[in-house]
Amino acid sequence: VHSNNAFYKTASTSNVFRINVSDAINTDEAVVGFYPNALTIFENYDSEKMFSNNNDAPQLYTLTSDNTMAAINGLPLLGLNEIRVVPLGFLSNLGGNFTLNASNLADFDITIPVFLEDVSLGVIQDLRQNASYSFASGAINSSSRFRLHFGSMTTEISNDANASISIYSFSNSIYVTTAKENGIIEVYDMLGKKVLSSLSKTGVNILQVNTSDGIYLVKVIYDGVTKTKQILISK
């Protein structure tokens, strides 16, 4: 039976984030979604990365928490004030200039901030402010150069100094957000030994901890306020 009624497609879901990489000729995409029943390990919400046979094409993938390379990575919903870090893998058999682009931010949940970290250059870019990031690379297959950060890494100055300090960790990196420079950031092991000390800059501070895996205490002091938080270092 033929009908003249219009065909209605399902609207794009706002819990799906898309990012692609391009060398101006070839493009490849990675997808991260957030779902109520998803897990961080590889499971039914995920799709394993199938790499292209085109050896000239740059390619993207993300890692699940059990280190599976995924083209589609389904994750649990973000909780209030939660930050989730997703390793973004990049493969290229040729060196050159490339561009990462968050392609659907207009559709992705506007309440979720998204940041791209270039680990090798120590750069963090707010993709809500600038959706494209250009970089140079040699031939590489690395899951450690880039990271996606979902959740608040705000650099706005707050009247409440303690509220403007954010502390969290991923792998062997510690991320401390402060609203002003020249604060003191200290890291202690659980025996009370200081293993790192640094002056803060305004915004996101990235500290590399070259010590053994374990629980550490991060202390941030500025404007007469002290904030401490236990974090996990796991290489």
Image (cartoon, rainbow, N blue to C red):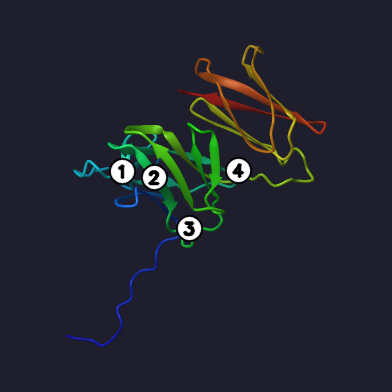
Q: Are marks 2 and 1 in contact (CB under 8 Å)?
A: yes
The residue carrying pointer 1 sits among few (fewer than 14), some (14 to 19) or many (20 or more) residues within 10 Å by Cα, namely: many
Question: Callout 4: helix, strand or loop?
Answer: loop
What's the residue type where badge 2 is placed?
Phe
Q: Which residue is mark 2?
A: 98
Q: Nearer the viewer, mark 1 or mark 4?
A: 1
What's the residue type where badge 3 is placed?
Leu
Question: Callout 3: helix, strand or loop?
Answer: loop
What's the residue type where badge 1 is placed?
Pro
Q: Residue 169 at what x, y percent from top left?
A: 55, 31
Q: Nearer the viewer, mark 4 or mark 2?
A: 2
Of residue 86 and residue 45, the one placed in the foreground of this image is 86
**Looking at the figure, which quarter contains the C terminus?**
top left
Point out the tag, 1 or 3, that comes first from the N-terminus. 1
Question: Callout 2: helix, strand or loop?
Answer: strand
**Looking at the figure, which quarter contains the N terminus?**
bottom left
Which residue is at a point 43% across and 34% down the rendered structure image?
Answer: 145
Question: Callout 1: helix, strand or loop?
Answer: loop
The residue carrying pointer 3 sits among few (fewer than 14), some (14 to 19) or many (20 or more) residues within 10 Å by Cα, namely: some
Q: Are marks 4 and 3 in contact (CB under 8 Å)?
A: no
The dot on residue 153 is 4
Point out the tag, 4 or 3, that comes first from the N-terminus. 3
Q: Nearer the viewer, mark 1 or mark 3?
A: 1
* Alpha-carbon span between mark 4 and mark 2: 25 Å
Q: Which residue is mark 1?
A: 58
| Image side of residue 159 versus residue 150, left or right | right
